[in-house]
Amino acid sequence: MRHILLVEDDDVTGNIVSDYLKAAKFIVHLAKTVQAARNMMNEHVMDLIVLDVTLPDGDGFDLASEFRNEITCPPIVFMTSHTDANDIKRGFETGGYDYIKKPFEVKEFIVRIKHVLGDFSNNPTKDRQIGKYRFNPTTQTLQYRNEYVILGRLQSAVLMELSTKIGVVVQKNDLLEKYWDGVTYFTSRNLDSVIVKLRERFKEDPSIHFLALKKEGYRLVIF
């Protein structure tokens, strides 16, 4: 069984989330303060950290940065009521794999936790270097130097497919069937729009090209 460090100072939220994680067959270590979290990290090998931002004796972002300096730091997921865009950006910049906003549906929370841990794939999703960019399929974020953008589900899904098969044509109809539930004029145009947006996202690296092959599909090439 895998160990999760849950850092949450609110008793109600901490107990509810802890109970759901235990029901999902995780071993949960609940810490209510920064110092308690440090102590538990020293006592146990954790597989995941779920971290609130506002804690009675410190800041969750600072604690995440501290943990990330450790070679053995596990993935970190923020769980917080801080929904400002700057806070979300800071969460990803400090190494967060996901950013879950309160209030949330607990069942969705469990799904996202399992996704970060790789339960839905034989190979856990990892960051990908695409030219001068770094893409994180789990958090759907694209990094260029110190700037981050959130791509959203469709852009992230298409980029994941193309970046897995760099230089290979990915059939347009396959993408439409998988992510748009069917091939129609409108879904086709929507996919074309996603490709245009991806080209704009990668404009700072002229070596990256999203090629459209008429009546076939798309190919991501880097040269």
Image (cartoon, grey):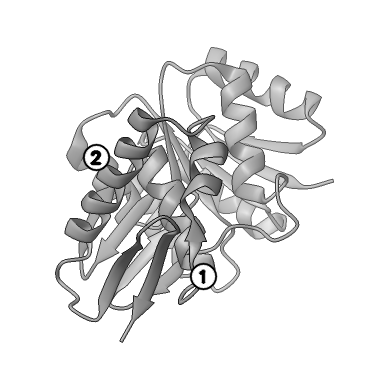
Inter-mark Cα distance, 1 to 2: 23 Å
Disc 1 marks a residue whose amino acid type is Glu
- Where residue 55 sits, quadrant-wise, is top left
Q: Residue 204's spot in the image, x, y percent?
A: 14, 71
Is residue 207 among what the camera can see? yes
Q: Residue furthest top?
A: 12
Q: Residue 66's spot in the image, x, y percent?
A: 41, 61
Q: What residue would you read off at disc 2? A: 87
Q: Residue 1's spot in the image, x, y percent?
A: 85, 46
How dense is the environment of label 2, judged by Cα within 10 Å: few (below 14), some, or many (20 and up)?
some
Using residue 79 as the reference point, say whether residue 206 is left or right of it.
Answer: left
In this view, the residue in front, 23 or 8, is 23
> Which residue is rendered at x = 42% and y = 30% of the image?
184
Q: Residue furthest front?
A: 215
Secondary element under disc 1, as helix, strand or loop, is: loop
Q: What residue would you read off at disc 1? A: 70
| Circle on res. 31 | none
Q: Residue 223's spot in the image, x, y percent?
A: 30, 87
195 is higher (above) or lower (below) than 99? below
- Where residue 20 sits, quadrant-wise, is top right
- Please tell me which of labels 1 and 2 falls first in the chain: 1
69 is higher (above) or lower (below) than 194? below
> Which residue is rendered at x = 51% and y = 45% of the image?
173
Q: Residue furthest bottom?
A: 223
Disc 2 marks a residue whose amino acid type is Asp
> Which residue is rendered at x = 34% and y = 24% of the image?
81
